Amino acid sequence: MTKIVCLGETLLRYATARGHRFKDLAFTLCVGGCETNVAVSLSQFNFDTVLVTKLPNHGLGDGIMSFLSSYGVNTDHIVRTSDRIGSYYLEMGSGNRPSSVIYDRSYSAMTTFSLDDVDLDELFKDANYFMTSGITAALGETVKNALIKMMKYCRDKGITVVYDVNYRAKMWSQEACGQALKEIIPYVDILSAGILDAENFLGLKSYYESYEDQLECYYKQIMTLYPNIKYITSTKRDIISSSVNDLTGYLYDGHLYHSDTYHIDDIIDRVGGGDAYMAGILYGLCTYEDVQNTVSFATAAAVLKHSIYGDANQVSVNEVEAFIANGTNRIQR
C-alpha cells in the first residue's frame, strides 16, 4: 500500500448557508485544511495516509481526531497541546457574489510546530510521499524551516516530495511567498503551480498569447531551472458565476497533458477542489502508466468534489472512474 505523509494545519470551518452573510452569525461546522483534505481523499483511494498537525487537548481536538480516524487517516503523529485550534469563516457565494473567507489562525497550535514535535525516522518509515503546501509554510519562519528540513530528509531517503504553492494573500505577501518558494523548490519532485505562480513568485516571463502555450513555456522554464522536478500540475478554472465554473486539469512531465474541460453548473461547495485534484494526481501517478489517465482522473475527482459539502472529498476510485466513463447521464444501479 502506498504511504503518504501530509504536514499541515487542520482547521475548523464555520460556513454560512448559501444566500446568508457573515453578519447573520449562522454557521455550519466542519473540518478543513489543505493537507488534511488531501489525506482524507487519498484514504478513500486506499492510500496509507499519515497526517502531521498539532491540535488542542480538549473536546474540539478530540472531535477532529475522531473525524480523521473515521476516514482512515493515521493520527498517531498528531501532537496534542494546550494551544488553540485554528479556524476560518466562509461566506458562501452565490450567483455573481463570490465567496469570502476570514481567517482566525494567529497563535494556533500549528504555528508552534518544529522538528521537536516529530521523530523523522519513525514518521517516514516505509513512506513513499511527503506532501505539504505554501499554506503551511506561511504559518511562520519556524514552521517553514521545519518543513524544509523534512524535505531534505525525504530527499536523502528517496521519498517523493510534493508541494502545492497554494498562495493565500491573507496569510503572507507575494514577496514572502516567493522567497520561501525559492528555498523550498530545490527539494520538490512534484509541484503544483500555475501561471500566476510562475510570474509572481519565480519572476518568469512568457510572450505567448494562448493559455496552454504560456503554461507549457513556464513549465519548461521551471524544469530547466529546477531539474529535480519530475511533474508540474495545475488547474484552469473559468468562473461564469459562483455556482457555475468550467474546470480543466494540466500535468507536465516535459510534455503538457490536459483533461477534458468540465462544465460544473450546480456547485455545492468548491472549497477543497484543488486538494481533491492533488489527491487524484498522486493516485494516478501511482496507478496508471499513461500520464493522460492521471490528469483525467484527477480532474474528474475535483469535479465530483464540487458536489459535496465540506472541505474534504468523499468519493471512491470506483465513483471517479464511473463518472469518467458515464458522466452524469446514467443512474448507478
Image (cartoon, grey):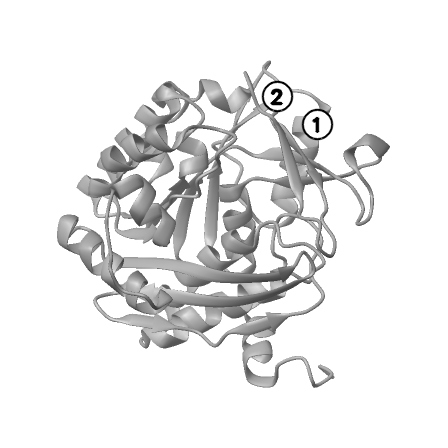
Residue 193 visible in rendering: no
Residue 305: give x, y in percent of width and height: 62, 60
**Quadrant in which the C terminus appears:** bottom right
Q: Are marks 1 and 2 in contact (CB under 8 Å)?
A: yes
Instruction: Identify the residue at image location x=45%, y=56%.
Output: 278
Identified at 55% across, 46% down, the residue is 73
SS category of the residue bearing label 1: helix
Question: Which residue position is annotated with label 1?
Answer: 60
Distance, label 1 to label 2, CA atoms, is 7 Å
223, 291: nearer the viewer: 223
Q: Amino acid at mark 1?
A: Leu
28 displayed left or right of 142: right
In the rendering, at what x and y percent does residue 120 appear? 32, 31
Q: Amino acid at mark 2?
A: Pro
Relative to 144, does residue 268 appear above or below in the rendering? below
Secondary structure, mark 2, is strand
- Vertical side of 70 occupied by 207: above or below: below
Q: Is residue 313 above or below residue 141?
A: below
User: Where's the N terminus, which quadrant?
Assistant: bottom left
Q: Can you identify the residue that label 2 sits on? A: 56
Q: Nearer the viewer, residue 16 or 69?
A: 16
22 or 300, nearer to the observer: 22
- What residue is drawn where x is 30% and y is 53%? 190
Q: Position of residue 186 (x, y in %)?
A: 20, 41
Q: Is residue 104 left or right of residue 168?
A: right
Callout 2 crowding tier (Cα within 10 Å): few <14, some 14–19, many ≥20? many
Tell whether 166 sits left or right of 153. right
**Image coordinates for residue 291, horizontal then vertical, percent:** 33, 72
* Residue appearing at x 24%, y 71% in the figure: 255
Disc 1 crowd rating (10 Å Cα; few below 14, some 14-19, many 20+) is some
